[in-house]
Image (tube, grey):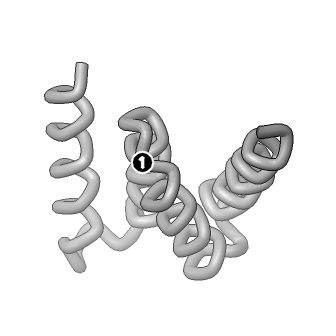
Amino acid sequence: ANAKYDEAQKEYESILNAKGLKYFHPEASLKLGVTFEAKGDAAKAREAYEKTGREFPQSEAGKTAQQFMRLMEMKTSKG
C-alpha cells in the first residue's frame, strides 16, 4: 500500500510544482497532507494542512485542511 501512497505523493508534488496548474494547487496540497497522514507521517501531514490553510484560506481545500488539523490535534490530545 505504501507504494501507492508514494506514487500519489509524487503526483501531488508535481501538480504543486506546475505553475500552469495553479487552479489545482489547493486540492493537491490538501491531498498531499492526507497522503502523509495515511503513510503515518503526522508531522508532514500537519505541515501540509497548515500550508494549505495558510495559502488557500478561502478555498474549500483550505477550510477542509483546517478541519483535518483540528481532528489531528484531537487525536493526539486524547493520546
The residue carrying pointer 1 sits among few (fewer than 14), some (14 to 19) or many (20 or more) residues within 10 Å by Cα, namely few
* Number of marks present in the image shown: 1
What percent of the width, then of the height, locates residue 52? 55, 68
Residue at x-position 28% and y-position 68%: 16
**Nearest the eye: 27 or 73:** 73
Residue at coordinates 39% horizontally, 52% vertically from top-left?
Answer: 32
Q: Is residue 57 left or right of residue 27?
A: right
Taking the image as shown, residue 61 lies to the left or right of residue 31, namely right
Residue 37: x percent and y percent?
Answer: 48, 42
Q: Is residue 75 above or below residue 56?
A: above
**Element at badge 1?**
loop
Q: Quadrant location of residue 21? A: bottom left
**Amino acid at dot 1:** Asp
Residue 22 position in % (x across, y down): 35, 72
Q: Quadrant of the C terminus?
A: top right
Which residue lies under the disc numbered 1? 41
- The residue located at (63%, 80%) in the rendering is 54
